[in-house]
C-alpha cells in the first residue's frame, strides 16, 4: 500500500467564497472614472486577503471581467489575492456597453463546470459586484432571465454601482433584485468609485463568510449601504502590502 500523502490536506480544509467583478469599460468610462476603477483594484487583493485571513473557515478568491464591445475575463479562473496582484493590469475604456453579453458570460462561469469546481469542501454563496455608467447596448433581458435560473446567482450577494446620470439604475436594480443594492455615484465625484468598490468588497466578503448572521447576507449588505453618509468620505482599512508586487 502506498504511503498517504497529506501535503494538500491543509489547503482544502476551508470552503471558498468567490467574489465576481463585472466592470463596464465602454467609451463613456474613459478618463477619471476608469482611473478610479484601476486605483480601487490595486487595493482589492489587500482587503480580501485581510478578510480571508480573519475567517478561519473560508478562503476568498477573485474573478474579474470587463465588458464593452466584448467580455474579457481578466482572471482565467478565480484567483487568490496574491495571484490577482500579478494578474490585474490597468484597463482602458472604449466601445459599447454589452451588459447582456456580460450576464451571459457570468452565467457560464458561475457553474461547477467552470469557476466553482475546484474545492471539494464546497463554496459559500458568491459575491457579485457590477459597475456601469450607461445603458445596455445589447439584449440584456433574455440574458438576465437565464442568469436568474442559476442557483449560484440566486444565492449570491449582489451590489451594483450606477455611475453618473446616464447609468440605467432600473436595469441594475433588476439584476440585483432590489434597488437597495444599487449605489448611485455622481459623475462629479469619481473618488467615490474607488471608495465604494473598496467598501462593498470589504462588506460583501466579510458578510458572506460569517456563519452567525441574524439575517441573510444580502439584507445585511443592503443595510450597510443605506447607512453610508454620502457627504462623508468612506474609510476602509486597507492592510499594508508591498506595492512593489504591482511592478
Image (cartoon, rainbow, N blue to C red):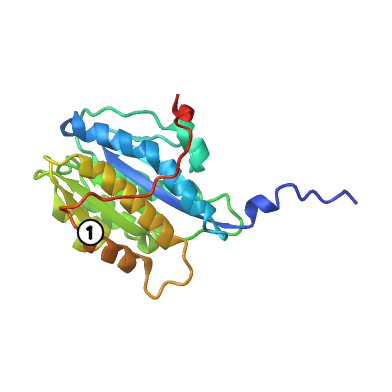
Q: Position of residue 68 (x, y in %)?
A: 25, 34
Q: Quadrant of the C terminus?
A: top left
In-front residue for pair 73/8:
8
Q: Quadrant of residue 190?
A: top left
Q: Position of residue 235 (x, y in %)?
A: 30, 50
In-front residue for pair 147/86:
86
> How crowded is the residue under tag 1: few (<14 C-alpha within 10 Å), some, or many (20+)?
few
Q: Which residue is mark 1?
A: 228
Is residue 125 at least partly visible in the picture? no
Please identify the residue farthest to the left as the structure is shown: 165
Seen at 70% across and 53% down, the residue is 9
Q: Position of residue 246 (x, y in %)?
A: 44, 28
Q: Secondary structure at mark 1?
A: loop
Please identify the residue farthest to the top as the structure is shown: 247
Residue 185, relative to residue 190: is it above or below? below
Seen at 68% across and 52% down, the residue is 10
In-front residue for pair 65/213:
213
Seen at 42% across and 55% down, the residue is 205
Q: Is residue 140 left or right of residue 53?
A: left
Is residue 236 at least partly visible in the picture? yes
Q: Position of residue 185 (x, y in %)?
A: 17, 47
Q: Quadrant of residue 122?
A: bottom right
Seen at 64% across and 53% down, the residue is 12
Amino acid at each position: 500500500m502506498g504511503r498517504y500523502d497529506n501535503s494538500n490536506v491543509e489547503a482544502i480544509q476551508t470552503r471558498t467564497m468567490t467574489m465576481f467583478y463585472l466592470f463596464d469599460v465602454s467609451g463613456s468610462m474613459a478618463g477619471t472614472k476608469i482611473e478610479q476603477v484601476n486605483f480601487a483594484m490595486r487595493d482589492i487583493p489587500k482587503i480580501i486577503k485581510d478578510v480571508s485571513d480573519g475567517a478561519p473557515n473560508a478562503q476568498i478568491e477573485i474573478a474579474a471581467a470587463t465588458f464593452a464591445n466584448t467580455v474579457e475575463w481578466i482572471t482565467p479562473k478565480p484567483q487568490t489575492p496574491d495571484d490577482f496582484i500579478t494578474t490585474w493590469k490597468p484597463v482602458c475604456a472604449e466601445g459599447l456597453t454589452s451588459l447582456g453579453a456580460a450576464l451571459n458570460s457570468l452565467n457560464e462561469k458561475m457553474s461547477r463546470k467552470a469557476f466553482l469546481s475546484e474545492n471539494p469542501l464546497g463554496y459559500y454563496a458568491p459575491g457579485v459586484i457590477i459597475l456601469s455608467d450607461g445603458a445596455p447596448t445589447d439584449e440584456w433581458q433574455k440574458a438576465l432571465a437565464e442568469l436568474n435560473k442559476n442557483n449560484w446567482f440566486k444565492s449570491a450577494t449582489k451590489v451594483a454601482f450606477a455611475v453618473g446620470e446616464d447609468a440605467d439604475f432600473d436595469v441594475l436594480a433588476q439584476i440585483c433584485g432590489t434597488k437597495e443594492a444599487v449605489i448611485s455615484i455622481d459623475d462629479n465625484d469619481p473618488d467615490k468609485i474607488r471608495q465604494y468598490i473598496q467598501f462593498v468588497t470589504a462588506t460583501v466578503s466579510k458578510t458572506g463568510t460569517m456563519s452567525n448572521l441574524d439575517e441573510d447576507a444580502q439584507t445585511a449588505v443592503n443595510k450597510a449601504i443605506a447607512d453610508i453618509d454620502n457627504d462623508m468620505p468612506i474609510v476602509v482599512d486597507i492592510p499594508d502590502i508591498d506595492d512593489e508586487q504591482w511592478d
